[in-house]
Image: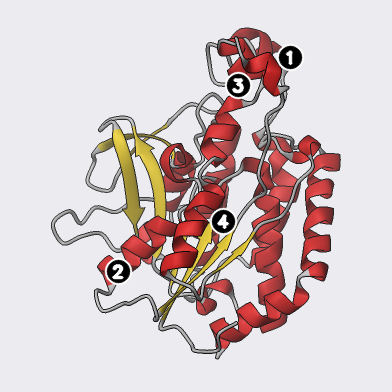
Amino acid sequence: MDTKQPHFRILSIDGGGVRGVIPARILHALEEISHKPISELFDLIVGTSTGGLIALGLVCPSKNKTPQYSAKDILNFYLEKSNQIFQHSFFRSIFTGGGLWAAKYDRKPLDTLLNQFFQDTLLSEALRPVTIPTYSLTKGCPNVITSWPSPEDPQDYYMRDIAGATTAAPTYFDPKVFHDKKGNLHIEADGGIFANNPETIGVTEACKFNSSLSRDTVYVLSIGTGSPKLNQDANKLTNSGVIGWVIKANLIDIMINADNDWYNDEISILYPQSNRLQVALPDRLGQMDNASQDDLQGLLNITESFLNTNLKKIENILYTLCT
């Protein structure tokens, strides 16, 4: 790695439901090795969907303005609470047609856990600048929410609401309905609709925040959640409709994750000091709602193997971040 040190360090975290176990464990390793919280290693953190939840958790302040949660705390949240968020109910499956005519999961358990996790913490209280993409259904367009609101529109939000918005994956959860601190109504869905890998959003917001940044002064660490694959043989999709594509072929996951590595190719050209950490997943662990203990442990085991294999790369990344 080039040892020339960047002036602005960006952490980008992909979406991916329960596969958030992967970036949470990698970030836990960074904290273990560096003995520093993630909020001290980066100047901006950007995350989409499950990555947005992680990003907000990393910058959530305690009463004495230190991190409320470590990366390990967030990892434990996934390992202990995922099965509550993705509760498989026979009766709801019948009621929703397995997600065909209503959201597959009740979002009340998700909102309850987010309320407990973030309580009344405001986005403006974040320990580090943080950026979260959502998709605004009220405006019908992408929405990029930051902890440094513009002077022209100085609105503020509760972290719990933004986390609930960016994780509202279509067909899995109903959109998040909430009001900002000014009383404006928002109906928001998963930011993965347009930016599941939010690297480019992070760089764009960083340049807005500091217009003097150049390609030699920016470093981006992008952490993926693995890449899901089609759950259906390609030959069977040549004449498929909604059932074939959306249900059997896992189309929603595929579409949301399609841009992940492509955006990284762009960033690596524009900002050559950047790194992408992506774990290869077997088909059985690709779905974002596989929340059984066996599946969660499988994600954790694969990530441990990845860390052991890439220890030197992790150390080089930390050298760039810390010196």
Q: Tell me the distance, in whole angstroms, between the alpha carbons under discs 2 and 3.
A: 39 Å
Viewer-side label of 4, 1: 4
Viewer-side label of 2, 4: 2
Q: Few, some or many C-alpha atoms within 10 Å of disc 3 (few <14, some 14-19, many ≥20)?
A: many
Residue 257, x across and y down, in percent:
56, 41
Q: Which mark is residue 90?
A: 1
Dot placed on the residue nearer the N-terminal end, 2 or 3: 3
Callout 4 amino acid:
Ile
In the current view of this chain or complex, which residue is farthest to the left? 152
Dot placed on the residue nearer the N-terminal end, 4 or 3: 4
Dot placed on the residue nearer the N-terminal end, 3 or 1: 1
Q: Is residue 273 above or below residue 91?
A: below
Q: Few, some or many C-alpha atoms within 10 Å of disc 2 (few <14, some 14-19, many ≥20)?
A: some
The quadrant of the rendering that contains the N terminus is bottom right
- In the rendered structure, the answer to whether residue 196 lies left or right of residue 308 reads left
Label 4, on which residue? 54
Label 3, on which residue? 104
Q: Tell me the distance, in whole angstroms, between the alpha carbons under discs 4 and 1.
A: 30 Å
Callout 1 amino acid:
Phe
Q: Which mark is residue 312?
A: none
**Going 78% across and 49% down the picture, which residue do you hit?**
299
Q: Which mark is residue 207?
A: 2
Dot placed on the residue nearer the N-terminal end, 2 or 1: 1
The quadrant of the rendering that contains the C terminus is bottom right
Residue 29, x across and y down, in percent:
72, 71
Callout 2 amino acid:
Cys
User: For numbered disc 1, what is the local secondary structure?
Assistant: helix
User: For numbered disc 3, what is the local secondary structure?
Assistant: loop
Is 146 in front, or is 322? 322
Q: Is residue 45 visible?
A: no
Q: Tell me the distance, in whole angstroms, between the alpha carbons under discs 2 and 4.
A: 23 Å
